[in-house]
Amino acid sequence: QVKLVESGGGSVQSGGSLRLSCTRSEYTHRGYCMGWFRQAPDKEREGVAMLDSDGTTNYADSVKARFTISEDNAGNTLYLQMDSLKPEDTAMYYCAEDRYRCTLVNGLPSFVGPPFAYWGQGTQVTVSS
């Protein structure tokens, strides 16, 4: 059973930065797909950023050029660097993992694919204007 633990959330003013971390309980050398998702009150959960095990990434249009998904060399931690934050980025942020390669659309990891098998408990991000 893979366990994911997010950290790094908090409160920041508009234009500020935060870096979220997601620590994995175990690493696999086989293919995997990881993603960051967020859910604001009274809104559906939405995909923010995806990372395939070959290093390919994809981002929601709303965060492109502001957010960066990455992982450490050991594969133990997934990151989401968030810059130029806006009040509309306020949400609970979750990391997720599946032990299969990401579903690709036009060569990029797609947010629309089989449900992720493993989820963290979430970390709150609040951006004030």
Image (tube, rainbow, N blue to C red):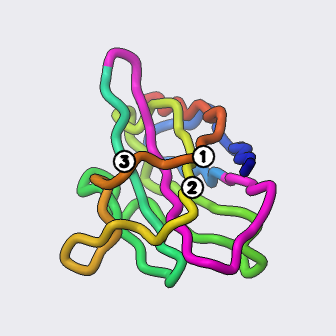
Viewer-nearest residue: 19 or 103: 103
Q: Secondary structure at mark 3?
A: strand
Question: Residue reaching furthest top?
Answer: 42
Question: First in sequence: mark 1 or mark 3?
Answer: 3
- Ranked by sequence position, the earlier of labels 2 and 3 is 3
The residue at 55%/49% (across/down) is 96
Secondary structure under tag 2 reads strand
Q: Amino acid at mark 2?
A: Glu
39 relative to 102, above or below? above
Q: CA distance from mark 1 to mark 3?
A: 15 Å
Q: Are marks 1 and 2 in contact (CB under 8 Å)?
A: yes
Q: Is residue 118 magenta?
A: no
Picture coordinates of residue 99 (x, y %)? 57, 63
Q: Nearer the viewer, mark 1 or mark 3?
A: 1
The amino acid sitting under disc 1 is: Tyr
Q: Earlier in the sequence, mark 1 or mark 2?
A: 2
Q: Which residue is mark 2?
A: 97
Q: Position of residue 35 (x, y in %)?
A: 49, 56
Residue shown at 19%/77% (left/top)? 106
Residue tagged by mark 3? 47
Name the amino acid type tagged 3.
Gly
Q: Residue at x 46, y 30 (%)?
A: 91
Residue 110 figure quarter: bottom left
Q: Are marks 2 and 3 in contact (CB under 8 Å)?
A: no
Q: Quadrant of residue 72?
A: bottom right
Instruction: State the residue position of label 1.
Output: 118
User: Can you say which quadrant of the picture contains the C terminus?
Assistant: top left
Q: Is residue 30 left or right of residue 112?
A: right
Left or right, 52 with respect to 112, comes to right
Label 1 and label 2: CA atoms lie apart by 5 Å
